[in-house]
Image (cartoon, coloured by chain):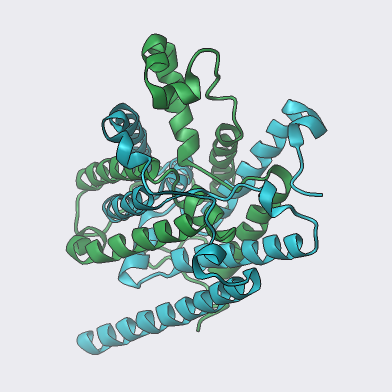
Chain colours: A cyan, B green
Amino acid sequence: MFPLNLPELVSPWGANLIYFAIGLAFGFILESAGFGDSRKLAGQFYFKDLAVLQVMFTAIVTAMLLVFWAVSLGWLDYEAIWVNPTYLWPGITGGLIMGVGFIVGGFCPGTSLVSLATLKLDGAFFVLGVFTGIFVFGETVESFSDFYNSSYLGRLTLMDVFGLDTGVVVLMVVVMAIGMFAGGAWVRDRLVLAKKEETGT
Amino acid sequence: MAIGKTDVDPTVDRPVYWNSYIAGAALGVLLFTSFLLTGNGLGASGGIQRVIVAIEDLVVPSYVDRTPNLATLAGGDRKPLNNWIVIEILGALVGGFLSGLIHRRLRIETRKGPRISKSTRWAMAFLGGAIMGYGARLARGCTSGQALSGGCVLSAGSWAFMLSIFASAYALAYFLRKAWN
């Protein structure tokens, strides 16, 4: 029955080794996908490069299908895995702030680490910025802790929100992802055509 | 739809990145494996936060003990670095380095749009990073810990968060087009 209790099963050191291996694979895949390159990442928001959308939503759909298959087969205990609790408004506000940070800086925290690891100077400055931002957050959060802890809805899932069965929500996410892949590619190709006509090539 | 078509870096001829759908599927399998083995997904900003708090705990331990949100990580005998996410981001740094090495992308350089200077790009990267770091802690997670990990287990808050990032980045993209194009 999964998830495993690693520290008990393979000792704390064995567990750390597995955490390290998971991180290693994470960094390797991000870099291989081109996510150490800020221009490639930012290209998403000008429909020049759809890798962010494609990688992210393929990953979410793949992991989601595997997770809920394993749950329905009784191999994985859904109640025992970490489902991010919902703090609705702090989450939405944080997301809106991060969108600004992304378009200004060109990374998210994870991709900036990979960029730094491949010696990109913009990645290094971004990582310095992330350290600064997180430090400042830690120093200021006490002044608005009411908001930070507001709209707490606990372990709320999309199934709870829509009142639908898990299978239906899973199918909706898959259909939405395919729709976004097709829609994104359609917009990108239209922009390429428009540019070609403009320059007459 | 261009499944199977590989995106090529348009600026220079350098080794091509993995096909996005293949990279995404690999990332999804990894994410699932992580949930199976550890009960957790992936993360980044939470690990960086723990490194910062560990430094603060070295320099000003009594201050950390008095500040509730820092004390939950490093108050008293708590060791902020003794956590899976810290080990995981160390692994991610090494993994990124190895991929760069194998694919011959280890090069000291600055990636930027052609119409801005290097120093402008550096300033924007620092500023963007600071904004991103602040927002990620307000949202209790970043693209890895909230969007990917919470998204695939269908957390409602993670989906609201993910839509917010894309909405605000797209809304602002037009005004910053000079920086990237």
User: Residue B153: image x %, image y %?
Assistant: 59, 58
Question: Which quadrant of the figure has residue A75?
Answer: bottom right
In the rendered image, the vertical position of residue B177 relative to residue A138, given as above or below: below
User: Residue A181: image x %, image y %?
Assistant: 48, 77
Q: Report how many numbered discs are placed on residues in the image.
A: 0
Q: Residue at x 48, y 45 (%)?
A: A114
In the rendered image, the vertical position of residue B33 relative to residue B122, given as above or below: below
In the displayed structure image, the side of residue B125 where residue A44 appears, left or right: right
Image quarter of the C terminus of chain A: bottom left
User: Residue B171: image x %, image y %?
Assistant: 24, 65
The one of A71 and A42 positioned closer to us in this rendering? A71
In the rendered image, the vertical position of residue A175 relative to residue B94, given as above or below: below
User: Residue A70: image x %, image y %?
Assistant: 75, 61
Q: Is residue A126 visible?
A: no
The one of B177 and A18 positioned closer to us in this rendering? A18
Q: Residue at x 66, y 48 (%)?
A: A81
In the displayed structure image, the side of residue A146 where residue B16 appears, left or right: right
Q: Residue at x 65, y 73 (%)?
A: A167
In the rendered image, the vertical position of residue B97 relative to residue B162, given as above or below: above
The one of A76 and A193 positioned closer to us in this rendering? A76
Q: Is residue B74 visible?
A: yes
Question: Which quadrant of the figure has residue B86?
Answer: top right
